[in-house]
Image (spheres, grey):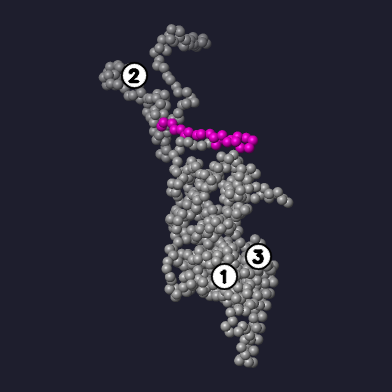
């Protein structure tokens, strides 16, 4: 203390030890082994979670001399608590509990042009045979099965299974004569509430009802049909293009050949074009001419009732030539410039399942315009005007037709079950069923036990044509009609649409509705509650994935580079330039050198027919495989409440 007060430095205790002391200390201290930092496992977090971090483990208390554990002796006779496990023991324990897993990958060298690339192929995953894959499997299982499959030649399977069929069974045997003239289902609406009843939707889409007439719909919904009158149309857009069919006027239940010697199935008409204003003049002059002829006939009857009208002799087999008439058809009311805005807004008053666009309408998920199907078309008629052909709608979709008036229309309808028999009649008469122009001879149908629904559509009546119904229409008076197609998400509709899609491919006829493209869009955007529709739609997606993956693997194995090019808004679906079949996802493109560079899409068959090695073909991919897999796995059956 005195030295400190005097300013002297205090003496420090030396920490130096002799080499002998350090050596003895190292012998007494146990060695500590630390795991290398790179291989040190992450500390386990067991117990940490929603309830907070794991409780802190208390360190075992060390006994010290002088503090006995009960015996008063040192060291104590009882063993102390176990020591904490060392880090190297924890590391080995983790490896033993969670043994490492490996996925063996095989790299396949592929030469592509000037360079080389490698394909990573899994070799240890368990795969399901391709023929055993079904809608219950996941997308990854489908892809693995496709990669493992050994497909020789082009892979081709149907998009629709017969086991999923929901079509009603056809009756065999002769039908009584009175049942060949079945009554047409007609619904009379008493209020707006009746029009929006779900019972109406169920009745119209029932596969047993090929056609339904809804009487007085315009009145119950207070539709202003005057917006579609000839006068209003001419005022709105007088220069709108009109396709004109020149025809021979004749009774609705007859169809005579050009010589007038007998009835036949072909129904020819020539095509030309005009405008709404010019056809309106023709329609009005035709009406005035009819009034004059009627007045002249009445005057002649008043002068000499005994004089018989001029005409062929009684018993003559020669049919006199009919009057030449013009039918204005396929007038497009799609509205890029808002010229038809009042007309289209008026149609929003209809029930949702009848509207041009709705979420439950498959045609609203095409992604682009199909004139006359997901847009409104107008027909301007004079008496005797016939639809260009007896027909089924494109891809067997349903259709809606409203008579604006003032005249009536006469309809003939046959259930979808009999379309093949009618197609056989067309073939025997030398006219193509899908693309030709024909008008059935009723006696031929009756003699073949084919029932025909026949009815008159009055102004304000709506005709619902169910999926696949064969029909033909003739105007009784001067009238206008508006029509469009709808695709309700119903098993019967989807099945018939896919059946016609595949039949069109067999017959080399273009399917106006790209069903594969539509199916993927529906699966992405719509929740399906109908089990039949769900099974058929999921099977279509399954088949589409198989076609895409097998083609993709074949192209890559041949060294073709696949370039990703995503779709843009309103981009249409693609069809083969040669055979008109739909081409989905993988586009095989060539450039045609003409006046300007033109890029053309081909299907695989047509591309290989041009060049088996596909040397000048560029392969574009519009959807990533992962994107399609995600859509497929996310597509599930939901309850009716969730769907609505």
Q: Place residue 47 in its image quadrant.
A: top left
- Tell me the residue that label 2 is attached to: 64
Place of residue 7 in the rendered image (x, y in percent of width and height, measured from the top left): 52, 11
Circle 1 residues within 10 Å: few <14, some 14–19, many ≥20: many
Place of residue 103 in the rendered image (x, y in percent of width and height, measured from the top left): 47, 34
Q: Place residue 114 in its image quadrant.
A: top right
Q: Earlier in the sequence, mark 2 or mark 3?
A: 2
Residue at disc 1, secondary structure: loop
Check residue 145 in the rendering and tell me which mark sits there, or answer none: none
Q: Is residue 595 magenta?
A: no
Over which residues does the magenta segment extend? Answer: 98-119
Which of 494 and 581 lies nearest the eye of the viewer? Answer: 581
Which is closer to the viewer, label 2 or label 3?
3
Which is closer to the viewer, label 1 or label 3?
1
Q: Earlier in the sequence, mark 1 or mark 3?
A: 1
Which is closer to the viewer, label 1 or label 2?
1
**What residue do we see at 28% from left, 17% from top?**
73
**What residue do we see at 50% from left, 34% from top?**
105
Which of 126 and 241 lies nearest the eye of the viewer? Answer: 126
Residue at disc 2, secondary structure: loop
Which of 394 and 151 lies nearest the eye of the viewer? Answer: 151
- Tell me the residue that label 3 is attached to: 339
Place of residue 258 in the rendered image (x, y in percent of width and height, measured from the top left): 63, 73
Q: CA distance from mark 1 to mark 2?
A: 115 Å
* 440, above or below 17, in the image: below
- Tell me the residue that label 1 is attached to: 265
Residue at disc 3, secondary structure: loop
**What residue do we see at 33% from left, 24% from top?**
82
């Amino acid at each position: 203390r005195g030295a400190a007060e005097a300013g002297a430095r205090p003496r420090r205790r030396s920490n130096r030890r002799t080499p002998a002391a350090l050596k003895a200390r190292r012998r007494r201290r146990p060695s500590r082994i630390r795991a290398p930092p790179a291989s040190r496992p992450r500390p386990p977090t067991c117990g940490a979670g929603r309830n907070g971090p794991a409780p802190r483990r208390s360190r075992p208390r060390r006994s010290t001399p002088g503090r006995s554990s009960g015996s008063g002796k040192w060291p104590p006779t009882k063993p102390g608590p176990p020591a904490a496990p060392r880090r190297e023991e924890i590391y080995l324990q983790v490896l033993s509990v969670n043994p490492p897993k490996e996925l063996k990958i095989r790299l396949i060298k592929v030469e592509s042009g000037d360079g080389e690339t490698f394909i990573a192929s899994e070799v240890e995953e368990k795969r399901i045979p391709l023929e055993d894959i079904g809608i219950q499997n996941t997308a990854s299982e489908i892809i693995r099965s496709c990669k493992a499959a050994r497909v020789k030649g082009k892979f081709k399977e149907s998009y629709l299974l017969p086991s999923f069929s929901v079509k009603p069974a056809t009756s065999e045997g002769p039908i009584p004569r009175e049942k060949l003239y079945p009554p047409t289902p007609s619904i009379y609406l008493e209020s707006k509430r009746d029009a929006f009843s779900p019972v109406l939707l169920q009745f119209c889409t029932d596969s047993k009802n090929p056609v339904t007439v809804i009487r007085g719909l315009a009145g119950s919904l207070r539709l202003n049909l005057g917006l579609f009158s000839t006068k209003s149309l001419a005022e709105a857009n007088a220069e709108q293009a009109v396709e004109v069919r020149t025809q021979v006027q004749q009774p609705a239940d007859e169809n005579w050949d050009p010589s007038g010697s007998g009835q036949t199935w072909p129904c020819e008409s020539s095509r030309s074009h005009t405008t709404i204003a010019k056809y309106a003049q023709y329609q009005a002059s035709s009406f005035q001419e009819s009034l004059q002829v009627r007045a002249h006939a009445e005057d002649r009857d008043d002068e000499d009732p005994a004089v018989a009208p001029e005409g062929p002799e009684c018993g003559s087999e020669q049919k006199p030539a009919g009057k030449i008439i013009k039918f204005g058809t396929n007038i497009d009311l799609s509205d890029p410039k808002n010229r038809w805005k009042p007309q289209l807004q008026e149609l929003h008053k209809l029930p949702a399942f009848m509207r041009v666009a709705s979420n439950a309408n498959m045609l609203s998920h095409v992604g682009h315009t199909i004139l006359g199907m997901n847009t409104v078309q107008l027909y301007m008629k004079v008496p005797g005007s016939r639809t260009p052909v007896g027909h089924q709608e494109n891809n067997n979709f349903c259709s809606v037709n409203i008579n604006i008036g003032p005249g009536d229309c006469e309809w003939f309808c046959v259930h979808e079950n009999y379309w093949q028999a009618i197609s056989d009649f067309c073939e025997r008469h030398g006219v193509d069923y899908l693309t030709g122009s024909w008008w059935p001879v009723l006696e031929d149908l009756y003699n073949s036990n084919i029932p025909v629904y026949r009815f008159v559509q009055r102004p304000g009546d709506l005709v619902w044509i169910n999926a696949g119904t064969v029909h033909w229409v003739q105007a009784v008076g001067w009238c206008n009609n508006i029509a469009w197609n709808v695709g309700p998400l119903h098993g019967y509709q989807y099945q018939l649409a896919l059946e016609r899609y595949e039949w069109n491919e067999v017959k080399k006829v273009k399917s106006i509705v790209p069903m594969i493209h539509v199916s993927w869009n529906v699966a992405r955007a719509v929740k399906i509650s109908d089990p039949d529709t769900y099974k058929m739609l999921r099977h279509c997606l399954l088949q589409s994935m198989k076609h895409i993956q097998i083609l993709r693997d074949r192209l890559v194995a041949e060294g073709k580079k696949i370039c990703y090019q995503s779709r843009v808004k309103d981009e249409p679906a693609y069809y083969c330039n040669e055979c008109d079949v739909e081409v989905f996802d993988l586009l095989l493109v060539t450039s045609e050198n003409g006046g300007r560079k033109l890029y053309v899409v081909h299907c695989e068959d047509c591309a290989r027919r041009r060049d088996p090695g596909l040397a000048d073909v560029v392969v574009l991919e519009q959807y990533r495989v992962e994107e399609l897999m995600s859509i497929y796995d996310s597509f599930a059956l939901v309850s009716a409440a969730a769907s609505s």
